[in-house]
């Protein structure tokens, strides 16, 4: 891969699901190229397909049709295990619903992605990340013992853990008060500045969207670039 080739390239992506006798098209004709280090805000109405696209970019599911290339690798041609390996190597993901493991403490949840990569000497880094999101005093808490916003911050620390090339974040400030949200936004952009992390952020938060150099609008499964 040359430096000029995009880190994310999506070609004619379509995603359909069948529910009983009904076939629903969730994404249609989605094309997208993102250069390494770009900051991109994905906006659009509820149900338009934003989370679906993010999940496909992370290889959590495979699309019905079309291509997704991540760091030059054809994600659409990989099986589940290979997609998981590609994800571990390149992608951090902040889910809209956090998806913390209930039986692990905050600290253990943050350490998990690095452990899955075979890096077990990461306790200090996980602690430092939890400090950075303002949870230094909650590391031993289990998810059920944390507020919604605190769980979200653990999920953000977890996504940062492996210093991913690409961070996919689904409404990362959606459950946070303005001050905590501002702190998380700073962290996201610091990651981008210091490590050149590509940011793809689903957000309704205008203060976050304005700091992204590109804005994409999803409307009923179709994606378009919005200009100035
Ligand atoms: N597994 C599934 N089976 C059937 N329909 C689904 C499935 N996953 C998503 N959908 C439908 O696809 C559409 C897009 O969902 P998605 O979660 O991507 O929306 P979104 O843009 O993220 O919305 P929100 O802003 O509310 O999070 C919705 O209408 C949803 O009901
Ligand atoms: Mg969503």
Image: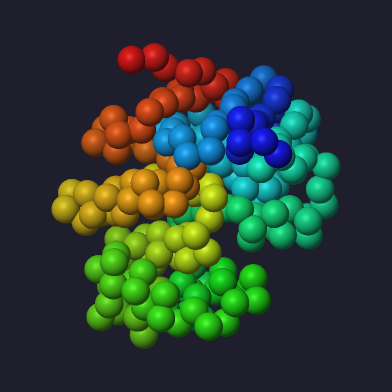
Regarding residue 222, the answer to whether it shows in the image is yes
Residue 69 coordinates in the image, percent (x, y): 70, 37
Is residue 153 or residue 1 the one in the foreground? Answer: 1
Residue lying furthest top in this view?
227
Is residue 195 or residue 183 the one in the foreground? Answer: 195
Question: Is residue 123 shown above or below 146?
Answer: below
Side (left or right) of 226 relative to 185: right
* Residue pictured at 47% horizontal, 39% vertical: 37
Question: Is residue 115 shown above or below 186?
Answer: below
Residue lying furthest front in this view?
2
Side (left or right) of 178 relative to 194: left
Looking at the picture, the colour scheme in use is rainbow
**Res 119 quadrant in image:** bottom right
Residue 81 coordinates in the image, percent (x, y): 78, 60
* Residue pictured at 62% horizontal, 42% vertical: 57
Side (left or right) of 79 relative to 124: right
Q: Classify the position of the C terminus by image quarter.
A: top left
Q: Classify the position of the N terminus by image quarter.
A: top right
* Residue pictured at 24% horizontal, 36% vertical: 207
Count of numbered circles on the image: 0
**Res 183 quadrant in image:** bottom left
* Residue pictured at 34% horizontal, 74% vertical: 128
Question: Is residue 58 shown above or below 114?
Answer: above
């Amino acid at each position: 891969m040359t430096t000029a080739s995009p880190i994310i390239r999506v070609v004619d992506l379509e995603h359909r699901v069948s529910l009983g006798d009904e076939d629903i098209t969730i994404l249609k004709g989605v094309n997208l190229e993102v250069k390494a280090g770009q900051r991109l805000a994905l906006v659009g109405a509820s149900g338009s397909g934003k989370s679906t696209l993010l999940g496909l970019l992370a290889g959590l599911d495979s699309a019905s049709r079309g291509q997704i290339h991540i760091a030059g690798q054809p994600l659409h041609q990989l099986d589940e295990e290979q997609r998981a390996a590609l994800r571990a190597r390149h992608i951090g993901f902040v889910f809209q619903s956090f998806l913390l493991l209930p039986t692990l403490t905050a600290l253990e949840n943050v350490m998990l992605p690095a452990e899955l990569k075979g890096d077990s000497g990461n306790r200090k880094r996980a602690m430092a990340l939890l400090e950075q999101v303002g949870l230094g005093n909650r590391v031993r808490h289990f998810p059920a013992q944390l507020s919604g916003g605190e769980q979200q911050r653990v999920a953000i620390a977890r996504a940062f853990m492996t210093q991913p090339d690409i961070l996919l974040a689904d409404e990362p400030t959606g459950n946070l008060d303005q001050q905590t949200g501002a702190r998380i936004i700073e962290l996201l952009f610091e990651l981008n500045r210091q490590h050149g992390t590509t940011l793809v952020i689903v957000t309704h938060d205008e203060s976050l969207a304005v700091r992204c150099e590109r804005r994409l609008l999803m409307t009923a499964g179709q994606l378009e670039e919005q200009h100035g």
